Image (cartoon, rainbow, N blue to C red):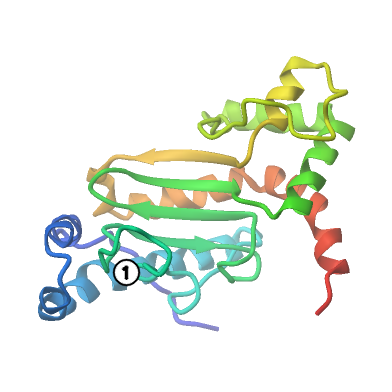
Amino acid sequence: MSDPVTFRGFGEKALPFLKALGFHQDRDWFAENKALYEAEVKTPLGDLVEAASMRFAAEGVPLRGSRKTSLYRVYRDVRFSKNKDPYNTHASALMTRTGNKKDNGFVYVHISNERSFVASGFYALEGPELRALRDLIVREPDKFRALLADMAGHGFELDRSEALKRTPRGFEHVDDEEMIGWLRLKHFTFIDEIDNAVVTTPALLDRMVRLGTISMPFLTFGWRAIDPLREEAPA
């Protein structure tokens, strides 16, 4: 059994550091301030994920992560980007059933000066998996509607900010306007916007665990759609 991990909040200098990093996209500056990044940003983010993992395990929620597998790097992948700034100005981590960031069906945390939030759901599913989820929605619209109503009862609505303008191919026969709206979604996520005053407090952990816990019926629905494809995939 691992020793309990305590999350006390991000350091008071975490957000100021990320803001300064936006102005100092310089490897020498980062090297000089790396100890501050480690203490105020990276270590608390690891504590948050591992404390949440323990809370989820205690509540029977199959989401887990660790500071080794769940944290996104501060270093940007600039190989295919016009923006060659070397560093991300946010801190983020993803928790999944496997603890692998490549898995889908997650709780995600994102911390920055511009916007901090916790999210749950499915994002950027591969084509066959997205089709499978849409097929399941068409087969079980009442179940899907009930799941959305349950989330709405907790104060959460599906994020529709990146919806398609047209109904995806293969679903042209659907004439229910509500269902069409669901099928046009590219991502199926719920977002809890976090005031930056919460970022430096243990309440951020509570918000993360709450969203993951109440999202479980929705995540289970999505896993029912995509898991058969993953079982068929070659090892």
Q: Amino acid at mark 1?
A: Val
Residue 130, compared with residue 5, is above or below; it is above
Where does the N terminus fall, quadrant-wise?
bottom right
**Residue 6 visible, this orientation:** no
The location of residue 173, given as percent across then percent down, is 88, 23
* x 30%, y 71%: residue: 42
| Residue 27 visible from this viewpoint | yes
User: Could you tell me which residue is drawn at 34 percent across and 58 percent down?
Assistant: 82
x and y percentages locating residue 53 in the rendered image: 52, 66
Residue at x 72%, y 19% (from the top left corner) = 178
Q: Position of residue 179 (x, y in %)?
A: 76, 24
Q: Which residue in the structure is indicated by mark 1? A: 74
Q: Quadrant of the C terminus?
A: bottom right
Q: Is residue 75 rendered to the left or right of residue 189? A: left
47 relative to 23 in the view: left or right:
right
Dot 1: what SS? Answer: loop
Q: Up-down: is 27 above or below 144?
A: below
Q: Is residue 61 left or right of residue 27?
A: right
Judging depth in this view, the residue of 35 and 28 nearest the camera is: 28
Question: Residue 149 location, x and y as percent?
Answer: 67, 26
The answer to which quarter of the image holds residue 90 is bottom left
Question: Depth check: 99 or 124 in front?
Answer: 124
Which residue is nearer to you in this view: 106 or 163? 163
